[in-house]
Amino acid sequence: MRKINLEDYNITKLVINPGDQMGEPIKVVLPYRVKDSLIEMLFTRDLQLGAADLVKQNMLAIKIEACTDGGILLEDAEYDRVKRAIDTIRGFNRFDVELVRRINEAEVVEVEQKQK
């Protein structure tokens, strides 16, 4: 299994206040929504998902949405779906670096089954 950190992180953007006559940029700190971004990546058109894969992606998206912890444990097949999505997508920007790093460097976690 792999553990991915789903906690949001901050990004800093330079924006120009439309009312500013001089057009001086100001720094604005915004949250990068990790869960939302990850879910969007699962459904990129570049993946060319068929019906069965679409259903599997949606099941994974629901699992990610339902996660209330700071991280999520993914089965190997689920992690492979996430990894395939980020390897397929083109057009990332600097704000995406941390998310891509978290996925590429996701911690391998050994899980023991509970005995009843």
Image (cartoon, helix red, strand yellow):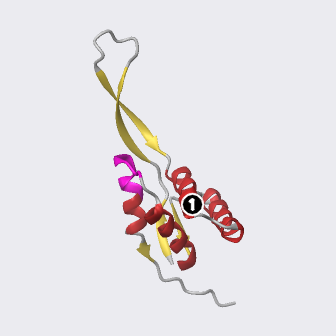
- Residue 103 in the image, given as x and y percentages of width and height: 43, 65
At label 1, which amino acid type do we have?
Answer: Leu
Quarter of the picture holding the C terminus: bottom right
Q: Is residue 99 above or below residue 93?
A: below
- Judged from this view, the residue extending furthest toward the top is 21
Along the line of sight, the residue nearer the viewer: 90 or 18? 90
The residue that label 1 is drawn on is 42
Q: State yes or no: residue 9 in magenta.
A: no
Find numbered disc 1 in the image and state the secondary structure of the residue it sits on. helix
Q: Does 50 sit left or right of 72 as displayed?
A: right
Residue occupying image coordinates x 56% and y 50%: 36
Say few, some or many: other residues with alpha carbon within 10 Å of mark 1 (under 14 / 14 to 19 / 20 or more).
many
Along the line of sight, the residue nearer the viewer: 109 or 17? 17
Residue occupying image coordinates x 47% and y 65%: 4
- Residue 88 in the image, given as x and y percentages of width and height: 47, 63
Over which residues does the magenta segment extend?
A: 91-99
Main SS, magenta region, reads helix
- Residue 43 in the image, given as x and y percentages of width and height: 59, 58
Q: How many marks?
A: 1
Q: Is residue 22 above or below residue 40?
A: above
